[in-house]
Amino acid sequence: MANAWKIARRSNVQLPLILVIALAVVVVLLGKAQGSLFDRIRAHATDTMAPVLEKLRGPVAGFDRFVGSITEIFSVYEQNLKLKEENARLRQWRNVAIVLQGRVGRYQALLHAVPDPKLNAVLARVIGRANRPFLQTMILDAGRQNHALPGQAVMDARGMIGRVYLAGQRTSWVILLTDLNSRIPVSIAPGNVQAMMTGDNSAMPRLELVSRTVVLHAGDQVTSSGDGGLLPAGLPVGTVVSDGAGGWRVALLADAAASQDVEILSFSKAPETPPPSAQLPAEAAGLKPQAPPPPAAPAAGTQANGQMNGQINGQTNGQIGNQAQGQSNGANLQSNVLANAQAKPKPVAPAPAQPADSADAEDEDR
Amino acid sequence: MVSLERIQAPRFRFLVALVPMASGLAGVLIANIPVSILGGLVPAPLFALVPVYFWCLVRPDLMTPAVAFSIGFAEDILSGGPPGIWTLAFVLTYALLARQRDSFAGLSGFVAVLGFAAAATFACAVAYFTVAGLNLLSGLALPPLVPIVSELMMTVLFYIPTTLVVAWLHHKLVGASRSDV
C-alpha cells in the first residue's frame, strides 16, 4: 500500500503525494494569511476573460429571458392588473414625496443643515454571476480604470445589491448581500433601530439587533446606516420579515439574479481623526485653558469644585495624560459653576473664561 | 481523424500526457464561467473532478498528484472561494483514490456512479470542513450545508455526461495502455 503514496509507479521524477498534500495545506494557510495575493490573481484572470464573458452574456441573457417568460406567460393578466393598481398607488406616493422633499429642503435651509455627501456613480453592466458553495458573486464590467474600488456599494434601480470586494482594471467582483461573508450595518425605520445584516447564503439575510430590547415589525424599512464610514447612509436595502422562529430577516428590494445594469456608488468619507492631544479638550471646545487652581480651598463651594475637578481630571488623565489636566479644568468651567451654585447660598462670581479671571473669582470667594 | 497509433508516436506523447490536465482545466473553466443559467438557482457542478477521478483510476501515470494539485488550484483561483480549499480537496480525494484504486477501478454500471458519488462526497466534505475550520478560527459562523450539498448533487448528476466526454477523449487521444510517457 505504500506504493499508493507515490505519484508515479514508473517514474521517479514526480513529487510524492505526501509532499503535494503538504503543499495544499500550505496554500490554504497562505490564502488565509495573504488573501490579497489570490485576489490579485483572480482579478487578473477576470480581466483577461472579460471580452469572452461579454460575448457570452447576450445569448445567456436571452436564454434566461426565454426561461423566465415560459413561467410568466400564464400569469400575464393577473400581473397586469397588479401593476396597474401598484402604478396608481405609486403615483399618489410620488406626489406626497415631492411635497415632503420640498418641505425637508426648506427645513434644511432654515436649520443650516449639513447637506448629505454627494455620491458619484459608475454605471456598470453585469457580465457574470457565480453561485458557488462558499461565494455568491456577480462580475461587473467596470474596474479600477472606471474608478470602481473595493468597498463601494452596488445598487440596482430598487436597492442595494452588495459591495465591490475585488476590483481589477476592467472588471470587479461584487459580494452580494446574501453571501455568507456579507455584513452590513443597517438602520431600521421607524425607530432608527441599529442592526447588523448578515448574509447566510439564503435569499433573505439575517438581522442581528444591536439592542435586545427593541421590537421590530414586519414591513419596517431597512436602509444602510453608514456606520463605519464604508457605505453611505440611507441606501434602501429591504423590508423586515419574520423568520418564524423569533428572529428577523430582510426581504431585499434588489433582485441580484435579474439585474442587468447596476450603479457603483463612489463614497469616500474622510475618517474622523481626533485632534492632537495638546488641543484636548479645552481648545477643541473653543475655550482657552485655565490655570491650575491654588492649593488652599477652604470654602464648601471650592470643595465641590475640587471634587468635580478631581473626578473629571481623573477621567481626563486616563485619556490624555497629565499635561492636559489644567486644560480639562478650563473645559469644565460650566460644571464648576453649577457645583458652586448648588453648594453655596451666597452669590458666586460668574465663571471666568480667562485664566486670570478665574484667579480673581477665587480671590473673591475667599 | 488522427489515429491513435499516430498520436502514440513519440513526438506526440508529450501532448498526450497533457490531455488529462487540459481536460481538468477545461472543466474548471466551464464550471466557473460566471454565467449562470436559471438565475443561479443551482451551483455549477465540479466538472474538474471527473477527469481527476477517471484518469486517476485509468492512467495514474498521467493524472499525477501534481496535476490534481494544479487542477484544484485553478478551481480555487476561478471559483472565488477561500483560497486553497479545492486544492486540498482535490489532492486528498486523489490520495483516497490512489489508496483504493483497485476497489474503485473495479466498479461498473450504476455502482460506478456510486463510486464517483463517494469520491465527490469526500471532496465536498473536505472543502466544507476546511472552510468551517477557517471560519471557526476567525470567529465566524459555520458555512451553511445546503450550497455544498447542492454542489455535490449537481456534480453527481453531471457525472455520466461528463465522463462520456472524458472517456471519448481517452479513447481517441490517450489510449488504454500504461505508457511510459
Image (tube, coloured by chain):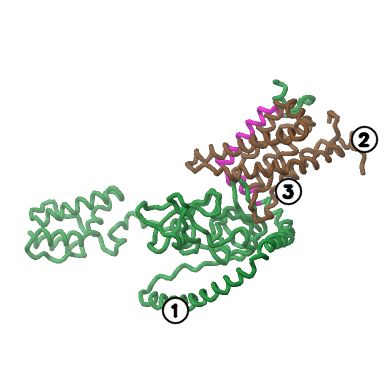
Give the quadrant of the N terminus of chain A: top right
Chain shaded green: A
Q: Is residue A152 visible?
A: yes
Residue A98 appears at what percent x and percent y?
Answer: 47, 78
> What residue type is disc 3 on?
Ile
Q: Could you tell me which secondary element the residue under label 3 belongs to?
A: helix
Q: In the displayed structure, would residue B129 be above or below residue A334?
A: above
Residue A318 appears at what percent x and percent y?
Answer: 28, 47
> What residue type is disc 1 on?
Val
B68 horizontally vs B133: left or right: right
Q: In the displayed structure, would residue A245 be above or below residue A124?
A: above
Q: Which residue in the structure is indicated by mark 1?
A: A99
Closer-to-camera residue (B83/A202): A202
Say which chain tag 3 marks.
Answer: B
Residue neighbourhood size for the residue with mark 1, other residues' Cα within 10 Å, grouped as few (<14), some (14–19), many (≥20): few
Residue depicted at 83% across the width and 31% down the height: B181
Chain part drawn in magenta: A15-43
Rounded to the nearest angstrom, the CA distance separating label 1 from label 3 is 53 Å
Q: Which residue in the structure is indicated by mark 3?
A: B30
Chain shaded brown: B
Indicate the quadrant where residue A265 lies: bottom right
